[in-house]
Image: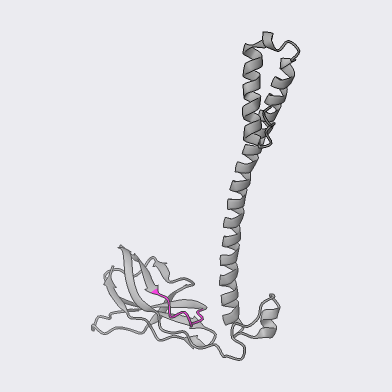
């Protein structure tokens, strides 16, 4: 005599075979009340479909949760990095936000020099600047973008601060037109400014 199945797929396969047999050979099984098996099978199918939908929703919810967690972690890391610079690694102050110093007893160093400054997306009266961040050992609070204009005597004037950025790119609008302009970038933290990057010259 066959052994009754224990695995779900095998149970379902047997149920389908039984339903088919009872429906097509009812005369051979007069004592079987067919509708009861059919109702039980339909009830199982409904529950299985609900389970499949719930599993799909769970996967989507897990994916969304992990994305949001990664976003939270990214924002936290940025804020902690800036907080370390703002407090010069003071463990007492960092304890206010549940954090500790990055390097106990080591003073914050002036950032290293940004590199490979380049002008992109140049338009009439505007442009975008991009550059490489200083080496990974540098703590950077922000970047100062400076500009100077070429004067009528063909000498450049003084460098002046025109923008501040927290990432290694900036969009500049409403810049002087028809003049020879020169731009450079400095990395900044509580210990001071870095050496300026290379400069780029452009006429808008």
- The residue located at (62%, 34%) in the rendering is 9
Q: The magenta stretch spans which residues?
A: 132-140
183 on left or right of 69: left
- The residue located at (59%, 72%) in the rendering is 79
**Above/below status of 24 relative to 198:** above
- The location of residue 45, given as percent across then percent down, is 66, 29
**Above/below status of 2 relative to 104:** above
Whether residue 201 is visible: yes
- The location of residue 199, given as percent across then percent down, is 32, 79
| Residue placed most toward the observer, 79 or 37 | 37
| Residue placed most toward the observer, 177 or 16 | 16
Residue that protrudes farthest toward the top in the picture: 27
Which corner quadrant of the image does residue 132 belong to?
bottom left
Asked if the magenta segment contains residue 204, the reply would be no
**Above/below status of 79 relative to 198:** above
Residue that protrudes farthest toward the front in the picture: 1
Which corner quadrant of the image does residue 159 belong to?
bottom left
């Amino acid at each position: 005599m066959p052994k009754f199945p224990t695995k779900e797929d095998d149970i379902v396969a047997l149920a389908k075979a039984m339903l088919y047999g009872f429906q097509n050979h009812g005369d051979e099984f007069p004592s079987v009340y067919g509708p009861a098996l059919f109702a039980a099978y339909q009830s199982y199918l409904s529950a299985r479909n609900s389970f499949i939908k719930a599993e799909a929703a769970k996967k989507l919810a897990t994916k969304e949760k992990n994305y949001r967690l990664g976003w939270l972690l990214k924002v936290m890391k940025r804020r902690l990095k800036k907080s370390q610079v703002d407090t010069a690694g003071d463990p007492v102050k960092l304890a206010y936000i549940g954090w500790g110093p990055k390097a106990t007893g080591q003073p914050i160093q002036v950032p290293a020099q940004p590199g490979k400054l380049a002008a992109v997306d140049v338009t009439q009266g505007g442009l975008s600047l991009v550059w490489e961040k200083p080496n990974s050992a540098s703590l950077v609070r922000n970047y100062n973008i400076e500009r100077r204009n070429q004067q009528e005597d063909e000498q450049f004037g003084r460098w002046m601060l025109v923008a501040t950025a927290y990432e290694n790119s900036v969009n500049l609008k409403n810049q002087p037109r028809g003049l020879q302009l020169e731009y450079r970038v400095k990395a900044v933290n509580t210990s001071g400014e870095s050496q300026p990057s290379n400069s780029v010259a452009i006429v808008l």
